[in-house]
Image (cartoon, rainbow, N blue to C red):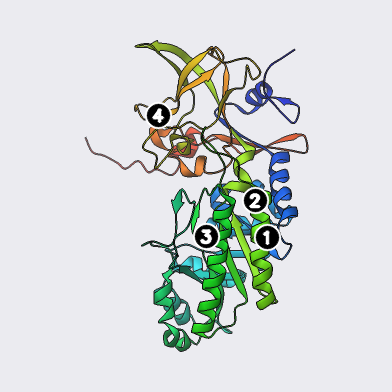
Amino acid sequence: MTSEYTVQGHPISALAEEFGTPLYVYDGDVLRDVYLSLRERLDPRVDILYSAKANPNVSVCAVLRSLGAGIEVSSLVELVTAKQAGAAPDDVIFLGPGKSLDELIACLELGVHAIVAESLEELELLNDMRVPGGARVMLRVNPSFESKGARLAMGGKPRQFGVDQDVLLRSRSFLRSLRHVEVIGIHGYMGTRILDAEDVVHNTRGILAAAEELSAALGFELRTVDVGGGLGVPYFDNEKDLDVDLLATGVNTAVAEFLDRRPGCRVITELGRYLVGWCGTYVVRARYVKESMGEWFVVADGGTNHHMAAVGIGSFVKRNFPVRSLTRYTEPALRPYNITGPLCTPNDVVAKQVALPEVRPGDLLGVERSGAYGPTASPGLFLSHGFPAEVLVLDGTPHLVRRRDTVDDLLGKQELIAIGD
């Protein structure tokens, strides 16, 4: 009887043998269950858009798109990813504080639902492009109220995101002067990693109220409101799961009251981490196990170069993502280990003093809840190790959805110049 971890019946050792390590494994069953569980609880008039930045793998995007999610993108590559994943243009929005001219042109050519304008200067640029019928935009507001519960606040404070609410309220004449921009709504995003349902409801009500105030003050028809999202995934010991039932009850009530006043307005929530975080496991293989000054260290073949989020960015105290022995998944913990990677820096610590069964060289370890902000938020080129493979197990079949970087991949874009003797 083996004690090792399996994914849809596939032993982790078999996946590691076939695809190598380090490796990200995404469980398609978990991906579907999380989305559908939320979808069945939310008012059907609330559209769910997936924030591709959390995990822009095209196959992950395609699974969520197949379930009914739209896609929110923030770069030209993410826009193309959404198209390749099969998202309808009207289910795509593009946001970001520093969009390039090429990105704006691509949005207009594809016909996305809206470009989320984050400055008055961006509106001027779009107006100068003289799109027939007007470029459809949503105004990203930095609201006057502060967010509640966000581990990383994105609004309600001085930020590079959006336009301050009081500035927008003074901009009626400016907006009316734009002949080639069509304002269709308001976008608000207060913060991320929110784990209290009442905080999500508070933020939702605040954005809906701000949208109505701005619509009335600026004189445009409110056709779409994006209330953001920011639903969190609990990583650390002192964190609890988000109460999705309580969240849905509060959000549905707020949306129903809003739509009673604004029938026909499209309401969007955009979610990234919450939809994909649960489905991923970062798999590394122990190379060396050693003791140093009374502490045990596991030196693995992958580390923070692939999973910088596990470092706990923004935390003064190191806290661990859930880490398990995948080889001895059901065995009891024996001692605490520091899990490190192959990098030449003392900061390459994925987990500190985490209790595990005895770890031996060759064992597989997994950082769980790692489906969001893994490779894409990590310094994958440090020491030129490159990025790991990514595998999606869907309907019982493992699929390689990103091959690991090779030496040719890493050196192929460099140019060796001629240097004289």
Q: Are marks 1 and 4 in contact (CB under 8 Å)?
A: no
Residue at (56% x, 39% y) in the render: 234
* Residue type (three-letter) at the residue carrying disc 2: Cys
Q: What amino acid is found at the position of numbered circle 1 in the picture?
A: Ala
Question: Which element is circle 1 on?
Answer: loop
State which quadrant residue 249 falls in: bottom right
How dense is the environment of label 1, judged by Cα within 10 Å: few (below 14), some, or many (20 and up)? many
Q: Quadrant of the C terminus?
A: top left
- Between 291 and 417, the residue placed more toward the observer is 291
- Rounded to the nearest angstrom, the CA distance separating label 1 from label 3 is 15 Å
Which residue has dot 2 on it? 61
Q: Secondary structure at mark 3?
A: helix
Amino acid at the residue labelled 4 = Asp
Dot 1 or dot 2, earlier in sequence: 2
Q: Residues within 10 Å of mark 2 (few under 14, many from 20)?
A: many
Q: CA distance from mark 2 to mark 4?
A: 30 Å
